[in-house]
């Protein structure tokens, strides 16, 4: 290979000689070239890094129709908690009145701390520290931490335990979180039945109950007030894929709007007044109820009204309404209801938007 460089007024020009003809004179056939073409390319000796393929896997979503906690929530709108392994960049929620023509509802940007209980959680007293056996929880991801008593009393380590359905959740807090196995914690020193959920706590939450940490990651979906108690279809999955992808979970849910549900009354008591029985109770509120100043807590409803039921053997013998936090069960009414021995009285506050809330219960004659 022969290169020839000719110097000109502007710059040098280089040619690659392909053919030389010898005779009385030399005839050269050459092609103009760019010298940089023949210089080695600056390739790195290291291979380019490539990301491993991460398949889209189904996510694990739970809807939580919760009472008001901060007071800033939409009262009729449920929360959604989602986890997955591996976690996609974001999870999308689509909804529709039927299983077709879905519209985008919301994004879940963060993975919720979700687990499954490995020990039962027995019912306990309301308003005092539950010092019973630790609750063991196996987490799908993340971790739990112990907190100081002052932080606990200020609302720290708030969590929900339930059967996985939309509305059946008890809200509680825990002070101690002890790591006892990989991703497994024992939760002790608990405050139970928070935010008016004392009216639905069973005798025990069984092994296999769902645990969700309410640390601000579970977020509310979009739901119109008119869609309360109306069945809706949801598709939930990796946001970078369409809702018809096999990685999406299909759920059908109905939400009653628990943030509108009145709390059960407190301190339901029965006192004999001759042959009559006087029942009295203390009203609670679902919003702004932590003010320890002078006076009663805010009503929280458009009007004060209660539903009172007299129960014998599981059957409702009498159902009445009261506009005050008291009711007198007359002897004549007892005779008319054929109530002579042990019976149960149940009282619930009524919301004009929600209806009767959770009941407080008291056994009479037992």
Image (cartoon, grey):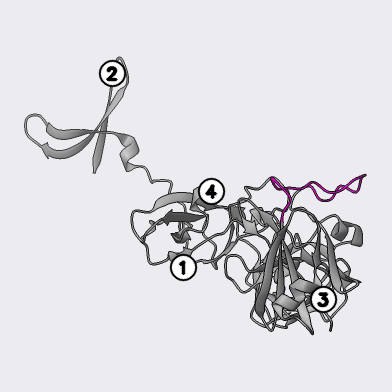
Q: Earlier in the sequence, mark 2 or mark 4?
A: 2
Residue 217 screen position, x and y as percent? 65, 55
What kind of element bears circle 1?
Answer: loop
| Residue in the picture at 79% in, 46% down | 298
Residue 166 screen position, x and y as percent? 57, 65
What residue did someone put label 1 on? 57
Q: CA distance from mark 3 to mark 1?
A: 39 Å
Q: Which residues are magenta?
A: 288-305
Q: Nearer the viewer, residue 41 or 198?
A: 198
Residue 138 screen position, x and y as percent? 68, 76
Q: Residues within 10 Å of mark 4 (few under 14, many from 20)?
A: few
Foreground mark, 4 or 3, reads 4
* Contact, mark 3 vs mark 1 (Cβ under 8 Å): no
Q: Earlier in the sequence, mark 3 or mark 1?
A: 1
Q: Nearer the viewer, residue 154 or 363?
A: 363
Q: CA distance from mark 2 to mark 4?
A: 84 Å
Foreground mark, 2 or 3, reads 3
Q: Earlier in the sequence, mark 4 or mark 1?
A: 1
Q: Is residue 243 magenta?
A: no
Q: CA distance from mark 4 to mark 3?
A: 34 Å
User: Which image quadrant is residue 64 in?
Assistant: bottom right
Q: Residues within 10 Å of mark 3 (few under 14, many from 20)?
A: some
What residue did someone put label 2 on? 8
């Amino acid at each position: 290979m022969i290169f020839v460089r000719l110097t000109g007024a502007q710059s040098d020009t280089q040619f690659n000689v392909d053919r030389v003809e010898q005779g009385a004179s030399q005839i050269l056939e050459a092609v103009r070239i760019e010298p940089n073409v023949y210089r080695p390319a600056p390739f790195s000796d290291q291979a380019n890094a490539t990301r491993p393929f991460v398949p889209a896997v189904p996510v694990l979503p739970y809807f939580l129709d919760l009472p008001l906690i901060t007071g800033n929530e939409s009262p009729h709108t449920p929360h959604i908690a989602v986890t997955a392994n591996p976690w996609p960049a974001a999870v999308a929620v689509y909804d529709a009145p039927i299983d077709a023509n879905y519209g985008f509802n919301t994004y879940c940007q963060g993975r919720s701390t979700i687990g499954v209980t490995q020990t039962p959680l027995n019912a306990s007293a309301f308003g005092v520290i539950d010092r019973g056996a630790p609750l063991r929880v196996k987490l799908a991801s993340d971790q739990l931490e112990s907190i100081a008593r002052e932080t606990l009393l200020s609302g720290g380590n708030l969590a929900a335990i339930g059967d996985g359905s939309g509305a059946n959740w008890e809200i509680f807090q825990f002070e101690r979180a002890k790591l006892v196995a990989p991703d497994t914690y024992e939760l002790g020193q608990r405050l139970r039945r928070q935010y008016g959920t004392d009216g639905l706590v069973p005798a025990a939450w069984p092994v296999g109950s769902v645990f969700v940490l309410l640390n601000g990651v579970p977020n509310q979906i979009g739901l119109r007030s008119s869609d309360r108690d109306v069945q809706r279809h949801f598709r939930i999955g990796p946001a970078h894929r369409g809702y018809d992808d096999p990685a999406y979970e299909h759920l059908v849910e109905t939400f009653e709007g628990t943030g509108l549900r009145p709390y059960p009354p407190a301190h339901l008591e029965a006192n004999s007044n001759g042959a009559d029985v006087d029942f009295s109770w203390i009203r609670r509120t679902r919003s702004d109820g932590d003010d320890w100043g002078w006076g009663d807590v805010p009503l929280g409803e458009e009007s004060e009204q209660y539903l009172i039921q007299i129960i014998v053997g599981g059957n409702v013998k009498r159902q009445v309404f009261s506009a005050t936090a008291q009711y007198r069960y007359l002897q004549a009414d007892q005779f008319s209801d054929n109530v002579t021995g042990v019976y149960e009285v149940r009282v619930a506050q009524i919301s004009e938007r929600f209806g009767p809330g959770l009941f407080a219960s008291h056994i009479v004659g037992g």
